[in-house]
Image: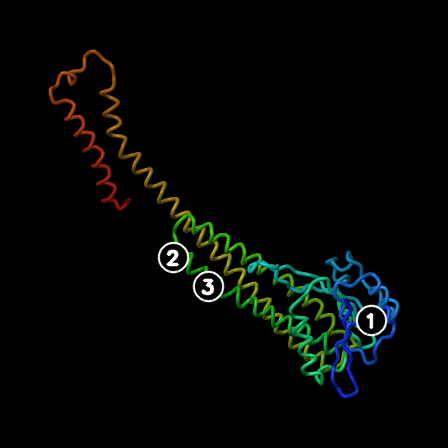
């Protein structure tokens, strides 16, 4: 599917669904958005605008030279945008979007629906005067994406605070399993956001150095880059917070396990004297005077009970129970 945004003479922006079979492009193109593009659409754009569209393998390479490059007429950016997995509140994935700039037209190539694109489309249609060419669209795209990443980090921070309170309050084994799973999920989210922020920072840093963009856009991108750097610092701090919560939880689990081990140890020690008494009178020697005692059995039972109680009292006095 190929959406074309054009700017009319009256300053308004129109959104058109372009069919390559028509072979007639509208005038004053601002942005061409290729969503799940077919091979025919890719070939048409490549030939019509003399673009070298990166392949799927090139889009996913991690080298800086594969994430951003430019020549005399074209800027190409492959960068990660976060996308929520359908039906999974705590799962985000990084999907690569290709941005290409030539002849002041922005080309976006994507293979998934992103809510941010709907937001940008609405902003363009609502305030067309703020978008004179494709560079303005690209600038706003990065600005809005950084705002969305900030919202995600704020949400993670709130969830981490709740998780910390739960770690300090809950003590059941079942709850520990859920808390560990929650910490792992938030850590994974944080790392996804960090990867996305780092990738966009590389792209924006290179874009600011380009001589193809004007000073106003450079100035705005510089501000957005400062915000992004602050998000990176916040993200690193948040990862440390989650590590701290995980350490607290691990310590609590160790404490609970130590309590259980101590309980079994005390029980074992308390049962040793009566076990010893029972073992002595379980021996099969012929000469055992106590065997002829009339009250031997109840005396031994009472002795075993007393020998069990005394160690427990001693442990309580020492504060071991």
Q: Residue at x 79, y 70 (%)?
A: 75
In the picture, measured across the screen, residue 252 lies left or right of residue 3, that is left
The residue where tag 2 is placed is 169
The mark that comes first in sequence, 2 or 1, is 1
Question: Vertical placement of 19 versus 319: above or below?
Answer: below
Dot 2, how many residues are within 10 Å of its Cα: few (below 14), some (14-19), or many (20+)? few
Give x and y (percent) for residue 162: 45, 62
Q: Nearer the viewer, residue 42 or 259?
A: 42
Q: Residue at x 26, y 46 (%)?
A: 319
The mark that comes first in sequence, 2 or 3, is 3
Question: Vertical placement of 10 versus 195: above or below?
Answer: below
Structural distance between the alpha carbons of marks 2 and 1? 57 Å
Quadrant of the drawing holding the N terminus: bottom right
The mark that comes first in sequence, 1 or 3, is 1
Residue 161, numbered label: 3
Q: Residue at x 72, y 76 (%)?
A: 137
Q: Secondary structure at mark 3?
A: helix
Give x and y (percent) for residue 116: 65, 70
In the picture, measured across the screen, residue 281 lies left or right of residue 71, that is left
Give x and y (percent) for residue 206: 74, 70
Number of numbered discs on residues: 3
Q: Secondary structure at mark 2?
A: helix
Structural distance between the alpha carbons of marks 2 and 3? 13 Å
Residue 74, numbered label: 1
Q: Nearer the viewer, residue 98 or 18?
A: 18
Structural distance between the alpha carbons of marks 1 and 3? 46 Å
Question: Vertical placement of 278 versus 148: above or below?
Answer: above
Dot 1, how many residues are within 10 Å of its Cα: few (below 14), some (14-19), or many (20+)? some
Q: Secondary structure at mark 1?
A: strand
Marks 2 and 3: CB-CB under 8 Å? no
What colour scheme was applied to this rendering of the protein?
A: rainbow
């Amino acid at each position: 599917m190929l959406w074309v945004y054009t700017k009319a003479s009256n300053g308004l922006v129109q959104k058109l669904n372009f069919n390559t079979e028509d072979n007639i492009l509208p005038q004053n193109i601002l942005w061409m958005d290729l969503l799940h593009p077919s091979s025919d659409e890719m070939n048409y754009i490549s030939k019509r605008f003399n673009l070298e569209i990166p392949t799927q393998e090139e889009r996913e390479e991690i080298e800086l030279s594969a994430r951003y490059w430019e020549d005399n007429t074209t800027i190409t950016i492959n960068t990660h945008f976060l996308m929520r997995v359908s039906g999974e509140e705590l799962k985000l994935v990084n999907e690569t979007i290709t941005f290409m700039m030539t002849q002041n037209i922005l080309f976006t190539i994507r293979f998934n629906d992103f809510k941010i694109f709907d937001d940008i489309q609405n902003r363009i249609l609502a305030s067309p005067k703020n978008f004179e060419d494709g560079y303005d669209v690209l600038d706003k795209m990065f600005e809005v994406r950084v705002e969305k990443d900030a919202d995600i980090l704020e949400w993670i921070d709130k969830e981490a605070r709740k998780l910390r309170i739960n770690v300090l309050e809950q003590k059941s084994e079942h709850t520990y399993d859920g808390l560990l799973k929650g910490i792992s999920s938030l850590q994974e989210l944080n790392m996804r956001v960090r990867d996305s922020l780092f990738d966009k920072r590389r792209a924006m840093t290179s874009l600011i150095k380009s001589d193809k963009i004007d000073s106003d856009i450079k100035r705005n991108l510089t501000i957005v880059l400062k915000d992004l750097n602050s998000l990176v610092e916040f993200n690193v701090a948040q990862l440390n917070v989650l590590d701290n919560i995980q350490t607290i939880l691990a310590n609590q689990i160790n404490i609970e396990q130590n309590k259980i081990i101590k309980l079994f140890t005390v029980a074992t020690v308390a049962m040793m004297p009566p076990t010893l008494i029972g073992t002595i009178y379980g021996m099969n020697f012929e000469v055992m005077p106590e065997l002829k005692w009339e009250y031997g059995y109840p005396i031994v039972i009472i002795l075993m009970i007393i020998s069990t109680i005394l160690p427990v009292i001693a442990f309580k006095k020492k504060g071991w129970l």
